Amino acid sequence: MLDDILLALADPTRRAILDRLVAGEARVTDVAAPFAMSLNAVSKHIQVLERADLIVRRRAGREHLLSRNPRGLEEAAAWMAAQHLKWNNAFDRLAKALENEP
């Protein structure tokens, strides 16, 4: 899942879609409106975000509504925090080793 999340976040269009959904649930057509691409192209970006569990789609009649799903970002944030801790510990050990050098 982490690979899917990082792949989804690597694209500026998909990040812009996530930013748009911070304001709340939105119709797919409204999310697609600001982009200079076809609705089909935006739908492919939306599918990548759905696979990464970053957004949720629900149907209301004929409309498809999108909203953010915090679980995906929480998973990525937890992984990054763990990596941050590992790297900080490694640099602390390196600094101590260098202090003991003649």
Image (cartoon, grey):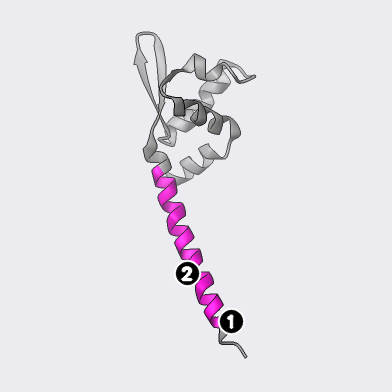
The residue drawn where x is 43% and y is 48% is: 77
Q: Is residue 83 magenta?
A: yes
Corner quadrant of residue 37 = top right
Q: Residue furthest top?
A: 62
The residue drawn where x is 53% and y is 40% is: 7
Quadrant of the image for the C terminus? bottom right
Q: Main secondary structure of the magenta part?
A: helix
Q: Is residue 37 magenta?
A: no
Q: Amino acid at mark 2?
A: Asn
Badge number at residue 89: 2
The residue drawn where x is 42% and y is 22% is: 66
Residue 19, image x, y percentages = 51, 30
Magenta stretch in the rendered image: 74-98
Secondary structure found at label 1: helix
Badge number at residue 98: 1
Distance between mark 2 and mark 1 Cα atoms: 14 Å
Q: Amino acid at mark 1?
A: Leu
Corner quadrant of residue 52 = top left
Residue 91, image x, y percentages = 53, 70
The residue drawn where x is 38% and y is 37% is: 70
Above or below for 85 versus 32: below
Residue 2, image x, y percentages = 44, 46
Badge number at residue 73: none
Q: Residue furthest right?
A: 36
Left or right position of 58 against 33: left
